[in-house]
Amino acid sequence: MNVQIPNTIVTSDWLYEHLYATNLIVLNGTIPKVVGASLAETQQIPNARFFDIKKVFSVMDAPFPNTMLDAATFTQKAQQLGINQESSIVVYDELGIYASARVWYMFKAMGFDNIAVLDGGFPVWKEKGFLCEEKVAFKGKKGNFEAKYRPKLFRNYDGMLQEIQNASSLIVDARSSARFTGKVPEPRKGLRSGQIPTSKNLPYTELVHNNQLKSKAEIKAIFESLQTNETEFVFSCGSGITACILALAAEYSGYTNYSVYDGSWTEWGTLYHKTT
């Protein structure tokens, strides 16, 4: 029996109930380097497939990390994971909600909406005592997924220059307050500290509690507290990962007009002082 994704976020209970639906695909979007060797998981949700953001689903020779693939390459890589047009996807993360939001956003940008993030990720799944299995590489049939790129969902450097000049949107930075204000150095070696002009700070951690997204009402109030009359949000972070958590929370709480700056501060902090 097939299943349809009901919302941007699904619970572990929902996933457990529908785990063996014919068209369901579970993706593990964890970035191993972020988790660290000491916390590395050897197990996974049954039948999960590893969605490798760093080594497969990013442009490997790009000057900045996590650069989004073009539609043709994304199509090829997704098909290799056995993903079909009629698939229903649930993506999880071993940290709770972190890189899973990036996976959700990538599919959304590629025209695919039948995907949800597992609220609380693998930590909550394990807390519930649900079945796990040893990790195994996917070796199934090739899928028929076809990407249909939505260019409005990603911003590039030139687009951000225009955003600042036009002041038509609110740029919101998901980094910590200390990084946003430059009180602590950026983790990327050689990258200067600072913030994009006109941007405001909303650390992604303010939207999450105990590995799960806060309620829709709480998230809505947080976004409203930014006191903006602009019609659009542009989300940024360090390298395009946690900005997608803001996008996920925005979608979950009812916002529809937003985009993500793919290069984020890594690109901006490298290029801006050289061109202005």
Image (cartoon, rainbow, N blue to C red):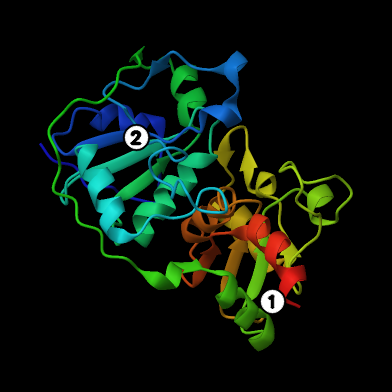
Marks 1/2: CA–CA distance: 35 Å
Q: Residue sitting at 37 percent across and 17 percent down? A: 130
Mark 1–mark 2 CB contact (< 8 Å): no
Q: Is 19 or 269 nearer to us in this picture?
A: 269
Q: Is residue 157 above or below residue 122?
A: below
Whether residue 227 appears in this view of the structure is no
Q: Residue 13 occupies which quadrant of the picture?
A: top left
Mark 2 = which residue? 27
Q: Is residue 273 above or below residue 220?
A: below
Mark 1: few/some/many CA within 10 Å (<14, 14-19, 20+): few
Q: Position of residue 217 (x, y in %)?
A: 58, 56
Q: Secondary structure at mark 2?
A: strand
Q: Is 44 or 52 nearer to us in this picture?
A: 52
Q: Position of residue 92 (x, y in %)?
A: 42, 34
Mark 1 = which residue? 228
Q: Is residue 47 above or below residue 60?
A: above
Q: Residue sitting at 58 percent across and 68 percent down? A: 234
